[in-house]
Amino acid sequence: MKYFIALFLLITLSTTAQSVRISGTVKDDAGTPLELANVIATHSDTGEMESYAISNTAGKFQFNLPSGYNYSLVASFLGLAPTTRELNIGKDADDITLDFVLLPAENQLDDVEIVYEMPVVVRGDTIVYNTDSFTNGTEQKLGDILKKLPGVTVSDDGEIQVEGQTVSKVMIEGKDFFDGSSKLAVKNIPADALKKVEVLKNFNEIDQMRGLGNDQDNVAINLKLKEGKKNFWFGEIQGGLGDGEKTRYLGSTKLFYYSPKGSINVIGNTNNTGDVPFTFRDYLNFTGGFRNFNQRGGTSFNIADSGLSFLTTQNNRASEISTNFGAANFSYEASDVWDISGFALFSDNSTDFIQRSLRNYIATEATEVNTETSEQRNQLGMVKFSSIYKPNDKLQLDYDILAKKSEQSEMTDALSIFTDSGNVVTNPITEEKDNNPFSLNQNLNAYYTLDEKNIFAGFVQHLYQKEDPFYSATVQQQPFTQILPLDTNQSDFDINQDKMIETNKIDSKIDYYYVINDKSNLNLTLGTTLSRQNFNSNIFQILDNGSLNNFVGDSLNNDVTYKFSDVFVGAHYKFKTGKFTFTPGLTLHNYTVSSEQLGTETSESEFKLLPDLYAIAQFKQSESLRLDYQMTADYTDVNNFAEGYVFNNYNRMFRGNREIENAIFHSARLNYFNFNMFNFTNINGGLSYTKRIDAIKSQTAIDQINQASSPINSNFVDEVLSANGRFQKTFRKWKANLSGSVSYSELNNIVNAQPTLSQNFTQNYQGSVETNFKNAPNFEIGYNRSINNYENGGLERIFYTDRPFANVDVKFLNGFTFTADWSYYNYYDKDDTTQNEYSFIEAGLRYQKPESKWEFRLDGTNLLNVDSLNNDSFNETYSTTTEYFVQPRILMASIKYNL
């Protein structure tokens, strides 16, 4: 790390020594400093932009220019005429001070033209980036452009953050791209089609609702296309073949059409190279644009995934992946008052896993080595239709319907070898999991403005969901001898479980806003949540002769009807005073929980008053401090109420508890955001604290490695404290990044009737520098260190991962581009019982003749042919260290045609 810092300082000092600082002020003809004015420096002979600056609140600007060249400096500000200064900088020139005075424009150009000439323009809550000012021509997709914009970061999972805030919606020409999916946008939208990126802060797509609530956490991105991309189809088609222990293939299609009346986007991908456009985790998280109902109402009641914990492993933890993906969406302006849109999406992933794990059980001190080979297939589909009807400025009606269907299966062959009290037990296992869930969401919203003082909003959401997970395990060692009445006169134990969960849930509320003045308003809310769930399950044994041994009794069968209702009324008052905005609120709830099972009915009802507070200190336009406090009543769904046992996997069973009560969560978040356009410094950080009272926890009994759990309300308080921070600074063609996150938790559980305290302390730190030259080779070098400290029941495990990384991007000759990414992992634990060192290298060479639509590529992944990687985890019953076997080296040749 010290060598990396020294190299960075050396390069920075050498760059500074060859440059001249240009500074000064930009004012209007009355002498008033102009904030957010642009000053652009271009080479006089070529017109190529060398650098630029944006003035601060005092009208000051500054940047560095290489000495020995002639420059044209242009200062501009919306509404005023640009002013140009010619500048000759000798090789031995000293720092230069220049002041600009901008006069009113006689023939003001169109705003769009002015914005296009400026690298960055800030207008209120909108930041507009001219992409050509930040790119060098090697960018392939939207994500490559966004990473180069000041104040913008993009994660490996496709999450976009602007000034530390997560982007919730991505649009193209004002039209939603797959309901705002940032991952699909980042990975698929071609870079050469983009003209500008508009960042929309304090975003609210409902005109009547703007400014009434707290939209400070809502950030959207709108992409503006180049002129040649409008009213024409554009995109790319790619195909390739390669080798990696077997024949590899890929086929990809990305087609886009945008016009003033509508848009069409088509994405297709088929490959066996490990590129997964849409994972099962994406499917679970993809809401289809459905909003979080009554976010600040104080109730947490979520319908849990009742499946069988299908793996959501990423492609770097699988030994083989084949995927087929297709998606299309459209938007159409049916009339001046009616817009419709929709999408259809299908994904078919076949994944093979080979993994080996070491588990240390805390309560019994047993050790288990588990080797698994799994074949998993997920076929996922969803279809959505949306309608927006806005006959006038006072009324808007929205309707959405989303259907999701999937077929999931997994076959696993495992060998479990565990040691307990010196005895070694070997247990071959075969598992089968199947699930075919279906869900249908409907959403109807209405917004009505009676007059400038009185505004109404109504919301109704309906969810229908059905799941039918099937589980089968064949084992040689008899499991759960105290629970399962197995026929032991068999060659092995073939145990099966049927389960069905059906859910109907309706959420509805009416919001009334009374606008007192431009600095305050009152919000009154009346609403309800009603849910009904049916839960059925049974466990049976298949005997050697094929007959069924159906287990009878209440403990191994479920037939449950579970109902939950929440009727609430709330009030929030938003007011501004100086730099501060406060929104305190109170919500009164009447909760009713009832169930029918085992021939009896239970019902409980109670009132709760839940407060919340949202406060903002807005120091400057791009500097703020935000406090968010909520008291939440956490209620469970039917999965924790059904008292018959169900299987989670071969050595874990679970039964509910109809006496379970709600928990109370106190959560507070403090976040700081600061993006300084003057020196392009982005600083953000946050603290969060959660205190859980009467938390719903697991009470677990362990016999050797077999675990039987049930939920209880803990008598102990759980606490979680976390902090994160990021520093990013751009100067000339360099960008420095520093980030870190820490989390400490104290969680209480009961294992074998004994209270256990789990203390987890995780840390992650990363630093990097990167360049963005127009013609010279560009690179990024960095270092990441993570520390995971787990302590439970007197057992402490500390794991470290040190990861230096680097990537390079080189243009050479006439149309060639070479890219390479390298990461080195050193994974080990404090006790020197676990260690693994490995490196991943990916590289690509592509050729595209200037102005040609054809591109030829040669790509390689896992060039060092790494076999496996490691991961660690910890819960209340055991710690786990897992080795995942990954895909081999793959070399791929492909051809791409750009429309």
Image: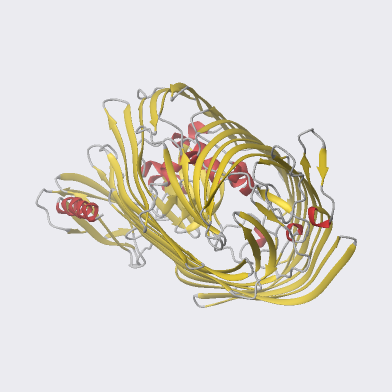
Is residue 585 shown left or right of residue 112? right
- Image point 56% across, 58% down: which residue? 218
In which image quadrant can residue 659 be found? bottom right
Mark count = 0
Q: Residue furthest right?
A: 599
Residue 581 in view, yes or no:
yes
* Image spot of residue 602 (x, y percent): 86, 68
Q: State whether residue 114 is above or below residue 724.
A: above
Which of 388 and 607 lies nearest the eye of the viewer?
607
Look at the image and tell me in which quarter the N terminus lies: bottom left
* Image spot of residue 88 (x, y percent): 16, 48
Q: State whether residue 36 is above or below residue 277.
A: below
- Which color scheme does this rendered protein use? secondary structure
Which of 735 and 602 lies nearest the eye of the viewer?
602
Q: Residue furthest left?
A: 92
* Image spot of residue 335 (x, y percent): 72, 41
- Image point 44% across, 22% down: which residue? 242
Is residue 226 shown left or right of residue 847? right
Residue 76 in view, yes or no:
no
In which image quadrant can residue 487 be found? top right
- Image point 58% across, 63% down: which residue? 215
Which of 598 and 367 lies nearest the eye of the viewer?
367
Which of 631 and 603 lies nearest the eye of the viewer?
603
* Image spot of residue 761 (x, y percent): 45, 65
